[in-house]
Amino acid sequence: MKSNAIVITGGLLDTIAAKTAHGLIRGTDRFNIIGIIDHKYPGKDAGEVLDGRKRNLQIYASIADFVSSSKEKAKYCIVGVATKGGVIPESLRAVLKEALENGYNLVNGLHEYVSDIPELADLAKQKGLEIIDVRKPKKVKDLHFWSGKIKEVKCPKIAVLGTDCSMGKRTTTRFLVEAMRKAGYKAEMIYTGQTGWMQGAKYGFVFDSTLNDFISGEMEHAVHTCYMEAKPDIIFIEGQSSLRNPSGPAGAEWIVSADADGVVLQHNPPRKQYKDMEFYPAYIPDPKDEIALIKIYGANTVALTVNTAKMKEQDARDYASKYEKDLGIPVVLPLEDGVQSLVPLFEAMIKKAAATV
């Protein structure tokens, strides 16, 4: 059974900094989220604050508010925000201490580990509570070099890439898995970030906590293990950053090391420069140019998905219509319309792969 959990967002629930919380609000197979802690929206429904869709998930002003007013009890307290530099500021340390004092185990996906903070680590030990630092890397003995066994994976492998970080790649990946499962196929997601793990994906690794020499091998190992154990009809691999983001380029491993059979590319038209890098003269390419680069790496882009942040819905639909004609591939709005329209595309890839085995 899933354990009950609350998610702390520090007044950032309505910002992109709370993307971990956003993912957990939309769904998780690992935890049962019973409350969001955010002092800006107490009493409101977290789903309505996120995207206008009621999810019967209440927001509380503080942990004390949750303890005193909720009829349900939580086992875990999850850090639902990304802080600047991934550090745990004093304000967040105070909330985590309060969570421990109330008997909650901690789940943290930030770069700084809660278990490295003596005050919190000692308190957790005294109370017999668990601290899960999701980004804590594996021991070297447990890491894998790339070996070529990826060729043993016979089902379609789809990399969900983006033109920048914080573009919604994980959400789209999860939507794709859900759509294929609803259509009757065995679909699996390879997580590559902390939120994917928190949402319950079984196979994967945390990309930005893995030693560079082992990234290609960990990617291959996750996909190969998933194929051998779960026997899926199709595998979707969550992307990170983008091929051209100068602060953290990523994507080649998804195409080359995971031997992707296709790419779904996510793009937000209004965003012209890379997130938090407006000071630097690097500009997000048009999807047509990114698709050409992806092709050079060795994969065909089979669909474009549009992140509609800062867009009017009609403008987004006009954009999708234009680019579908220009690119000759499906262009969809995942949050507004879902991704069910892409099912026939992947169904055809599954049948083609099965015919060659």
Image: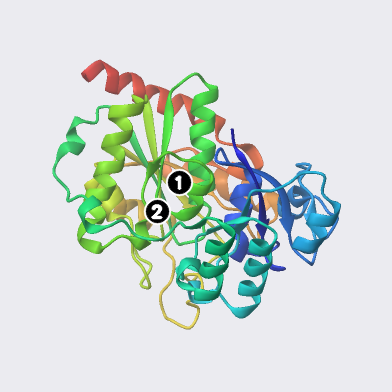
The reply, left or right, for residue 257 in relation to residue 197 is left
Q: Secondary structure at mark 1?
A: helix
Please say if 139 is above or below 255: below
Q: Name the residue rendered at 22%, 47% in the picture.
A: 257
Quarter assignment of residue 284: bottom left
Helix, strand or loop status at disc 2: helix
The label number, if any, that marks residue 356 in the structure image: none
**Vertical order, 254 against 63 (above or below):** above
In the picture, measured across the screen, residue 276 lies left or right of residue 224, that is: right
Question: Quick one: label 1, few (<14), some, or many (20+) residues within 10 Å?
Answer: few
Query: Which residue is identified by label 1?
Result: 326
Q: Residue at x 39, y 53 (%)?
A: 288
Q: Is residue 237 left or right of residue 14?
A: left
Name which residue lies at 69% across and 68% down.
10
- Residue 352 lies, with reference to residue 54, above or below; the image says above
Mark 1 or 2: the one toward you: 2
Residue 352 image-quadrant placement: top left
Q: Amino acid at mark 2?
A: Lys
Q: Residues within 10 Å of mark 2 (few under 14, many from 20)?
A: some
Residue type at the position of mark 1: Asp
Name the residue that disc number 2 marks.
Answer: 288
Q: Residue furthest bottom?
A: 279
| Residue 26 on image: x %, y % | 64, 44
Mark 2 and mark 1 in contact (Cβ < 8 Å)?
A: yes
- Name of the residue lying farthest toward the front: 126
Judge whether residue 333 can be spotted in this image. no
Residue 11, image x, y percentages: 72, 68
Distance between mark 1 and mark 2 Cα atoms? 9 Å
Q: Position of residue 96 (x, y in %)?
A: 63, 67
